[in-house]
Every structure is written in C-alpha cells, then in structure tokens.
Image (cartoon, rainbow, N blue to C red):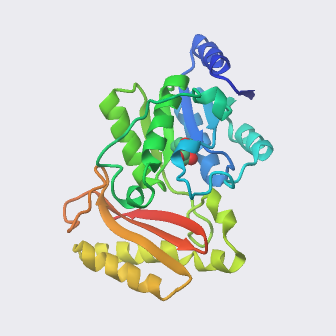
C-alpha cells in the first residue's frame, strides 16, 4: 500500500492503476478510522480493483466553535487499518497541499443541506460538498462509498454528483454499530464512560419509532414524539432534533405512507454531538 501527500503523486498513482486496467474505488475519510470505515474500504474492494482512501481533516466543514483542532488524529493506526482492510493507496494531503491559500470557490447544495444538521451547523455542508467535489476531481474515482450513518451528507453528495455530472457512482453502505447498537463514530471516543453507556438509548429510540411504523403508525409527529419521550427518560442525552425526512430531498414529511423516508436524530452527551438514523 502506497501513501501519497500531493495531488501530482495521487494522479500518477491513479494513472498507473488505470494503465493496469483497474477501476478506482474511493473512500473519503477524516481519519481516526474505526470498524465502520474499514467496512467501507472492504466494500470498495468488492466494487473496484484499486482502492484509494483519503485521510484529510477538512477545516472548511467545521464551524468556528466546533472541534477541528481537537478532532482525533491517528495516522499510524489508520495506515495499518487501511492496509489490513485492503486499500491500495492513501491520499493524505496537508491543508496547504489541498487548498490554494487564496481559494474562493465553494460548492453549495441548496435545499438538501438546509434542515437537520444544516440548521445547527451553518456552512458545514458547503465545506463537505466543496471538499468532496475537490476529492472527486483529484481522484477521478469510478465509485465512492459513503456510510448511511451520515444520512444528510449522503443525500448532499448524491445531489452534487447528479447536478454537476460527476462521473462517479455513489454507494451507500450500512451503518456499522457497536454491540449495544450505538452507531460507530470517531466522536464516540470523546464520551465519558458513563455517557458512553447512556448513548445506547439513541439507537433504541430509533428502533421504537421503526416498530411503531411497522405496526401501522404513519403520522410523523406521533412517531417522533414516541421516540423523544423515551429519550427524555435519559436526561444526560440532550436532544437537538428528531425529524422524519424524505431520503432523497431531506425534506420533512408529515406522514410516511408511500414514502422512502428515515427518522434522523442528533443529540449531545456532555460536549459530544452524536447523530443516527433509521429507515422507516
Ligand atoms: O464523512 C466524513 O468523514 C467527511 O465529511 C468527508 C466525507 C470525508 C469529507 O470531509
């Protein structure tokens, strides 16, 4: 497995793989890889001959009061994980190698970016859409794998690819969960031991909503209030939002009948913000 840090090196490695007749699979990450990321890499390996992983903590998707400087970084362990999961190349640029010092171009995916996390993290999805567009251009990947856990990010990227005609196929990979159901996230390691145990209520309330939906309840307000009532029983978990949204547009749906939709939730435990979702 090769590691490169600049765009010319990346392009050369990709050109070599293409000259060997390989298709390019891509897994964009911000590093600090856990089993969820490794399963994306393994999935990429099933979809393409040559798998490229980017490791870049993208400053433009963090707000001024967010955790950019303390976002966990673990390059040596990441390298070992990528190799073990079957990656062929890591692209790990510095901010200076990736963004021009006076860059002024941004990509905004209006609408899809507006609600849910977009409401509470202004500018976040502009940063994500911009860096992912840059990564698609830099890597020229044929297929890219994204986790379903970041539901709104997935919808933003699908729309970006559709609207701007990026020649890349997007694959959504299932959310990988801990034994107690908590969705894997690099931010889980911020949780104090006690909070970590309490965080298991998050997937439980989503399951409650799903079971209710399966039993025939279609009213979104009723489904959300059943979920949030249960969450309120654990005061350490502070709800930021609980919404039922259309999977493609991320618009709120008042009734789930005949729609492809998901229940999405964001909450805080201490200073740590966690998100999760479940298809209904
Ligand atoms: O999901 C992430 O880790 C990031 O948002 C991504 C897609 C790598 C862009 O920085």
Closer to us: 179 or 187? 187
**In the depicted structure, whether residue 231 falls above or below residue 137:** below
Which residue of the protein is positioned furthest toward the front in this rendering? 102
Q: Nearer the viewer, residue 72 or 97?
A: 97
The residue located at (51%, 26%) in the rendering is 141
Camera sees residue 22: yes
Q: Is residue 196 above or below residue 186?
A: below
Coordinates of residue 231 in the picture (x, y in percent):
46, 82
Q: Is residue 186 left or right of residue 145?
A: right
Residue 6 position by quadrant: top right
**Up-down relation of residue 153 to residue 237 (above or below):** above
Q: Position of residue 80 (x, y in %)?
A: 78, 42
Q: Quadrant of ligand 1?
A: top right
Instruction: Name the residue at 26% across, 72% down.
Output: 220
Q: Is residue 215 at all visible to an observer of this figure?
A: no
Horizontal side, residue 212 vs residue 85: left or right = left
Along the line of sight, the residue nearer the viewer: 99 or 55: 99
Residue 17: x, y in percent?
A: 62, 17
Q: Quadrant of residue 126?
A: top left
Image quarter in which the N terminus is found: top right
Instruction: Assign the C terminus to one quadrant of the image.
Output: bottom left
Residue 147 image offset from top left, x and y in percent: 50, 49
């Amino acid at each position: 497995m090769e590691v490169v840090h600049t765009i010319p090196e990346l392009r050369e490695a990709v050109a070599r793989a293409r000259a060997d007749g390989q298709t390019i699979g891509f897994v964009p990450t911000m590093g600090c890889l856990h089993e969820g990321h490794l399963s994306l890499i393994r999935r990429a390996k099933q979809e393409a001959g040559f798998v490229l992983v980017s490791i870049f903590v993208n400053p433009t998707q963090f707000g001024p009061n967010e955790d950019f400087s303390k976002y966990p970084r673990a390059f040596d362990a990441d390298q070992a994980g990528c190799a073990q999961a079957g990656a062929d190349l890591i692209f790990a640029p510095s901010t200076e190698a990736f963004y021009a010092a006076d860059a002024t171009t941004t990509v905004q995916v209006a609408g899809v970016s507006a609600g849910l996390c977009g409401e509470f993290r202004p500018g976040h999805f502009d940063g994500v859409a911009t860096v992912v567009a840059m990564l698609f251009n830099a890597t020229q990947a044929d297929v890219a794998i994204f986790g379903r856990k970041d539901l709104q990010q997935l919808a933003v990227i699908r729309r970006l690819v559709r609207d701007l005609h990026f020649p890349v196929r997007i694959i959504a990979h299932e959310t990988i969960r801990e034994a107690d159901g908590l969705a894997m996230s690099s931010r889980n390691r911020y949780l104090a031991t006690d909070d970590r145990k309490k965080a298991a209520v998050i997937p439980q309330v989503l399951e409650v909503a799903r079971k209710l939906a399966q039993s025939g309840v279609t009213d979104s307000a009723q489904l959300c209030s059943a979920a949030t009532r249960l969450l309120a029983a654990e005061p350490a978990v502070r709800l930021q939002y609980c919404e039922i949204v259309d999977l493609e547009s991320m618009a709120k749906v008042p009734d789930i009948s005949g729609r492809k939709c998901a229940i999405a939730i964001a909450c805080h435990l201490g200073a740590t913000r966690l998100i999760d979702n479940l298809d209904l």
